[in-house]
Amino acid sequence: MILNISGRSDVVNYYMEWLINRIKEGYLDVRNPFYKKLVSRIYIKDVDLYFFITKNPKNLVDNIQYFLDKPILVHVTLTPYKKDIEPHVIDKKEVIESIKKLSNIIGKDNVVIRYDPVFLSNKYNLEYHKLAFSKLTRELNGYVSLFIISFLDIYKNVKKNRNILNYREIKEEDYKEIGTFFSEEAHKNNMEVQTCFEDRDLTEYGFKKGDCISKELAFKMTGKNFKKWRARKGNKCNCVELVDVGEYNTCLNFCRYCYANFDENLVKSNYKNHDKNSSLLVGHLEEDDIIKIRR
């Protein structure tokens, strides 16, 4: 089993104490997002790989000893946007320092940067992204081997924040300029670039064709074969099956483009209902919950 921590929330940033408690207890519970009474119980002994996704890896660096008994893959989402787009994301200089420390512990091939999502506006135009990406690749030369690039998807939250994002359509000439420049800068700094879940994979401009966690990578890290993940629609994702420990509407980063948050009041309510000693990320088990062990 590959534990996804998490595509639904920044667990590392906001709920690390809870996660460590679950590691110590030996299990955690996850509510089904579509059928709330159904709860998956996950025993840590059944986990083959920890897959972390975060915008602030500092808590992971500080508590890495709790996870070193299993293989670790970390995706750090690192974008060049400011507080108008990412209100509660910490200073990017601090993020970069934590990435370097993490790379020195688990190795640069196990730390991946997600430059995700790319959108274009009057403020965040092509030149802005080119300068930002060039600076990032220079700063992280020797600390990471791969950047994953994704483009803005029009989720519910994106539509709600249309006037804040002020995004425009990305045209074919934009893809060409991004693809060419990003590829050249990455290769210049000993890195590869690939897209994720995109119709335009940019391979004609030097991008690598790949997945976040391919069957080959999962086997290399765990020695086990995993089934294809079927949670994402569109048949553009060939990642292996992942088990997410998070819950939607629980991330306090409040990024204006986020797919996992769509109700800030609910986020605040869920955060208040979080108990670091509960088996669930939010709230507690109820008498009529149906608990099924996830193997």
Image (cartoon, helix red, strand yellow):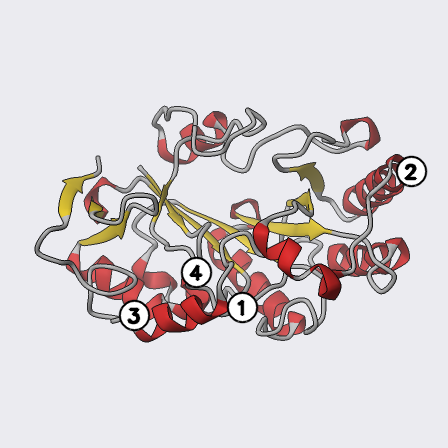
Horizontally, is 72 left or right of 236 in the view?
left
| Residue pointed to by mark 4 | 249
Horizontally, is 53 left or right of 147 in the view?
left
- Is 226 above or below relative to 266? above
Question: Disc 1 to disc 4, how far (Cα)?
Answer: 11 Å
Question: Disc 1 to disc 3, how far (Cα)?
Answer: 16 Å
- Is 81 above or below relative to 179? below
The nearer-to-camera label among 1 and 4 is: 4
- Dot 1 surroundings within 10 Å: few (below 14), some, or many (20 or more)? some
Could you say where residue 139 lies in the image, as x and y percent from the top left?
A: 73, 62
Question: Hey, what amino acid is under mark 3?
Answer: His
Secondary structure category for the residue under label 4: loop
- Dot 4 surroundings within 10 Å: few (below 14), some, or many (20 or more)? many
Horizontally, is 12 left or right of 155 in the view?
left
Question: Mark 1 touching mark 4, by CB under 8 A?
Answer: no
| Residue pointed to by mark 1 | 253
Question: Disc 3 to disc 4, how far (Cα)?
Answer: 12 Å
Q: Mark 1 or mark 3, which has the lower sequence index?
A: 1
Q: Mark 2 or mark 1, which has the lower sequence index?
A: 2
Question: Hey, what amino acid is under mark 2?
Answer: Glu
